[in-house]
Amino acid sequence: MLAFILRRVFQSIVVLLIVGFVAFSMFTFVGDPIDNMLGQERTQADIARLRAQLGLDQPFFVQYWNFLGNALQGNFGLSYRQGRPVADILAERAPATIELAAVSAFFAMVLGIGLGVFTAIRRDGFASNAIMTLSLIGVSLPTFLIGILLIYVFAVELGWLPSFGRGEVVDLGWWTTGFLTASGLKALILPAITLGLYQMTLIMRLVRSEMLEVLRQDYIRFARARGLKERAVNFRHALKNTLVPVITVTGLQLGAIIAFAIITETVFQWPGVGLLFINAIQFVDIPVMAAYLMLISVMFVSINLIVDLLYFAIDPRLRVGKGGGH
């Protein structure tokens, strides 16, 4: 077990170093920040002074080493556009994205697993077939189109929910939340459904297919032959074994919710880090872009590591395959 953890941690560090190199390379190969930060009246002395201030006059690998060292301390430099520390800007935007992603993930997991089990158990029923047909909408339609359709129906036509923004938020000092206000909760509904719909349908279809496969196994027939109740067979035996592969895919999808919240935040003008990244691209704000890439990669690597460890702990065949591995 310890050898497996150490190997996975080492692989994660290698991946982060590679992503860090890619993120840092943007400072060199994606335009010159001096042109964006200084106006037309700049002098050579101004350019030299700013290059020295930003550390751009140092060799490439020295800059890369300094970048990694500062990133480990949470220092991603100054935003070229706002002139403020990138870490402070990300800290201001992160609560909006985390709350949106948390609600979307909850929506995707609860409905995805619940509907997946229901459509597997009632696979020939009318409701099951209707759910599977409707799920094609979540899989096949692009996220931005789903968001626009929801805005048109629930904001424009019915006027029930707001079409953009985060609503009123409560400042808790180090955190701003929309969970404590009515307008904040209403503003959260449409973006959360838009962001979680694809993951929900994906999880539902995966749970259904795995559940159907498990229900055909001999030990399920044996459990029914022993006279166990159908509820016990479905939820105590079948669902437990269904969740092993579902954990891997669900973990990666939860990471994707935050990483790909960019589109949803753009459609709904949700003030999170995704919208911040889009604005950073428009203004070639490279420190913000690099910090976003680093944070997303750390999140993905962490989730992958946790999923692998859970997979290792749940599936005894992996421990046997590792020679006991304890």
Image: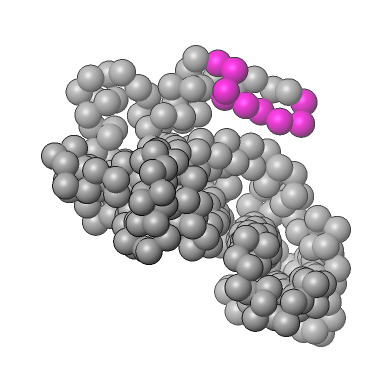
- The verdict on residue 216 being magenta is no
Q: Residue at x 67, y 62 (%)?
A: 313
Q: How is the image coloured?
A: one colour
Residue at 49% in and 57% down: 241
Q: Residue furthest top?
A: 182
Res 277 quadrant in image: bottom right
Looking at the rendering, which quadrant does residue 266 occupy? top left
Q: Find the magenta span and give its range.
A: 173-181
Q: In front: 229, or 302?
A: 229
Q: Residue 175 magenta-drawn?
A: yes
76 sits to left or right of 132: right
Quarter-wise, where is residue 75 in the image?
Answer: bottom right
Is residue 137 placed above or below 23 in the rendered structure?
A: above
Query: Where residue 4 sits in the image (x, y, percent)?
Result: 75, 75
Which of the two residues, 133 or 59, is positioned nearer the viewer here?
Answer: 133
Q: Position of residue 279 (x, y in %)?
A: 52, 51
